[in-house]
Every structure is written in C-alpha cells, then in structure tokens.
Image: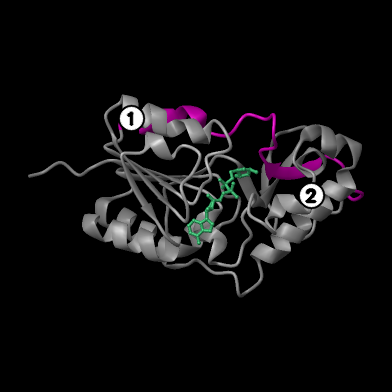
Amino acid sequence: MLKTPKIVILTGAGISAESGLSTFRAQNGLWEGYDVNDVATYEGYMRNPVAVHDFYNMLRRKLQNPEVKPNTAHFALAQLEQKLGSDNVLIVTQNVDNLHEQAGSKNIIHMHGELLKVRNEKTGQIIDSYYDVNYHENKLIRPHIVWFGEIPLQMEEIYNAISQADYFISIGTSGNVYPAAGFVQIANQVGAKTIELNLEPSLGKNLFQTKIYGPASKVVPEFIEKFI
Ligand code: APR
C-alpha cells in the first residue's frame, strides 16, 4: 500500500479574505489604518494598553459577526485532514481567527496566537475570551497575540513537522513575515514538494515548485481534490 503523504499547510490572511476578514497588507488592509508599532508591539502596549485592547476588541467583534464564516478553502483543508488523518495533515496558521476550527480542522498550530484567547502576563495562563477586554478591570490580561519582536508559538513542533513533510502548501500569505516566510526553504531542503496557492505571486514565489494563482475559495478546493 502506498504511504499516506505527510502534509504541512501554512495559511495566512488571504484564506480568510473571502470570509469577510481583512488581510494586512492590501489596499484598505488592516495595517493601512494603523501603525503596527502602536497596536502590534509590546512597546506599543506599554505606551497605551487601552488603545491596543480597543484594536483587538474591534477585531474580536468582527470575527464574531455571524456573517463571518469559513469558506470553501477552510472546508477543503478540514476534509483533507478527515481523509488522510490528523497525524498526516498539520495546519500552521498565521491567522488569529478561528475559521479553520469552525470548518472542522483539528490539527492546527496558531503560530501568531488567537484572537479569542487572552493571557495572564504574570502566570502565563491562557483563557478563552469572547468579549471585549477592559484593561482597567484587570491590568494583567493581554491579548494572546504574538506581536512583532515576539517569538511565534510552537516553533519546535512546526520545524519537526516540516522536516518530515512530503508536501508543504502555502496558502494566502504574502511572504513578508518571518519565520513563516522561511518555512518553504526548509521544506525544499528536506525534499518536500512545495506549492503556493495565492491570489498573486508572493515575495517567496521563486522558492515554490508549483504555483497556482486565484482566489482561495476556488484554487484550494481544486488543488486539494487530488488528494481526496
Ligand atoms: N485568496 C487567496 N489569497 C488572497 C486572497 C484570496 N481571496 N485575498 C488576498 N490574498 C493574498 C494576497 O495576495 C496576499 O499575498 O493573501 C496575502 C495576504 O498577505 P498579508 O496581508 O501580508 O497577510 P499575511 O501574509 O497573513 O501576514 C502575515 O503579518 O502583520 C502580520 O501577524 C500578521 O499573521 C500576519 C502576518
């Protein structure tokens, strides 16, 4: 019997764009109206914690808008995991939304944290959080988000998985932010097949062996179908 392939899938904001969530670097993207130094660094948080909580409260509310739902790309990845088994399919997402979970994926690493979680700065305890956070009620609670200058989560697990991967598929990410933008190089080094599925060529486009460009809701289900 043929061995089941091991697949690592890196996702970015582009996979959730058609679900109604803004990407970061597009025109009218999230970073256009904000200075990342203010809302996405620990220094910004120290300077103005209330403004930073306001920003994540706004994103948390957007995510929980009933119109924001997983799209066919999220569902295709969940189906892939169901078919090949959770030991063989890992989603490493840079997204802080929970649309992969909503679609039914189980084996997910949120390397940049999660919007619907907060963390106690003193104890490190991670707590589910569906409502606005009020800094004045508890000054130790910060968003469970990896900010610029902080170390992404579960890196050892991610590198282990990529080193064993037969396929590395990157979906909906511009390739601007490391370490995620460097994963494709490791995948190439270990002999994995590397595939980019994105609306447009990413910064790392030349590092991928196969590239398919178009909206995630179309190109992801079409590509995944061949494994199912
Ligand atoms: N289908 C597929 N790809 C899309 C779609 C779509 N419908 N819409 C946009 N894209 C692509 C864009 O072409 C772009 O290449 O998704 C990519 C989104 O890029 P970014 O906005 O830079 O988002 P991402 O790569 O996820 O950002 C990485 O940067 O600011 C940090 O922490 C934040 O996790 C984020 C990280």
Q: Position of residue 46 (x, y in %)?
A: 87, 35
Q: Nearer the viewer, residue 15 or 147?
A: 15
Q: Which mark is residue 34?
A: 2
Q: Which mark is residue 118?
A: none
Q: Are marks 1 and 2 in contact (CB under 8 Å)?
A: no
**Residue appearing at x 76%, y 42% in the figure:** 36
**Which residue carries the number 1 mark?**
188
Q: Position of residue 196 (x, y in %)?
A: 39, 46
Q: Position of residue 31 (x, y in %)?
A: 72, 49
Asked whether residue 78 is in view, the answer is yes
Left or right position of 17 against 190: right
Q: CA distance from mark 1 to mark 2?
A: 35 Å
Q: Residues within 10 Å of mark 1 (few under 14, many from 20)?
A: many
Q: Nearer the viewer, residue 36 or 27?
A: 27
Q: Is 149 situated above or below 55?
A: above
Q: Residues within 10 Å of mark 2 (few under 14, many from 20)?
A: few
**Residue appearing at x 62%, y 74% in the figure:** 66
Q: Is 173 situated above or below 129?
A: above
**First along the sequence among labels 1 and 2:** 2
In which quadrant of the rendered view does residue 77 lie?
A: bottom left
Asked whether residue 138 is in view, the answer is no
The stretch drawn in magenta includes residue 79: no
Q: Which residues are magenta?
A: 136-164
Q: Is 135 situated above or below 67?
A: above
